[in-house]
Amino acid sequence: MISHSGNVFVLSAPSGTGKSTLAKRLVQEVSDLDFSISFTTRAPRAGEVDGKDYFFVDNPTFDRMIETGGLVEWVEVYGHKYGTGKDWVMSHLATGRDILLDIETQGAKNVHAAIPDAVMIFLIPPSAEELSNRLRKRGRDPEAEIKVRLDYARHELCQFPAYDYLVVNDTLDRAYRDLESIVLATRLRRERMGRQAEQILQGF
């Protein structure tokens, strides 16, 4: 179990739901919130930058990280491995800053096992039809892969009871406001603010 002073937010969603777009906006607009960058064995897509979007590594390197306990969680999806670096997470949490993990459902369960008070958020599409339309409009995946992603989306949606919050991404702005509210409200929890309240009480 990892001890920490910052908050951990875990955001999961089926592919095509808008998770990455919303995660990037949260980190840009909410202060003291850092984006956790995952390691992956897949090749970079057009425009992706190593060390910014992902840490791109080969299979032997990734496997060594598994063997040496260098990952908080890892999972294999669509034939590629993804994982969260343990050293990165621990160093950021020690500063008191919050981190946001953009990961799929199995990885999220592993993070929750290591960090039980992580705030679990699941982003869902307005409908199965809308998710299908969004995947096709992206125009970057062949039809066979889109069908695989839709099949896996159903599996992921069945995992929603493991999450603390469910946010529907019908419009990006509304979904963003909901996500921002969760982050800000978490920072005001009694467990986080209790010491400040006690200091104020001592002044009476």
Image (spheres, rainbow, N blue to C red):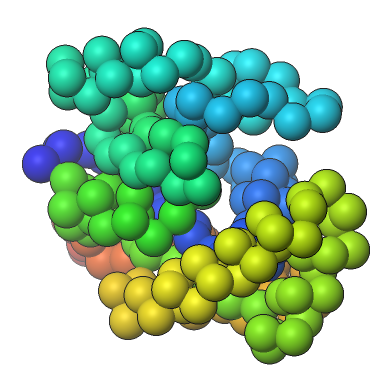
**Point 68% across, 25% down: residue:** 44
Identify the image quadrant of the C terminus: bottom left
Q: Is residue 174 above or below residue 56?
A: below
Q: Position of residue 19 (x, y in %)?
A: 64, 58
Q: Is residue 120 above or below residue 69?
A: below
197 or 58: nearer the eye? 58
Q: Position of residue 155 (x, y in %)?
A: 43, 73
Identify the image quadrant of the N terminus: top left
Q: Position of residue 90 (x, y in %)?
A: 28, 27
**Point 83% across, 48% down: residue:** 140
106 or 166: nearer the eye? 106
Q: Is residue 105 left or right of residue 19?
A: left
**Point 35% across, 43% down: residue:** 75
Q: Position of residue 116 (x, y in %)?
A: 18, 56
* Residue 153 visible in this rendered orientation of the protein: yes
Q: Is residue 46 left or right of residue 29?
A: right
Q: Is residue 114 left or right of residue 96?
A: left
* Picture quadrant where residue 134 is located: bottom right
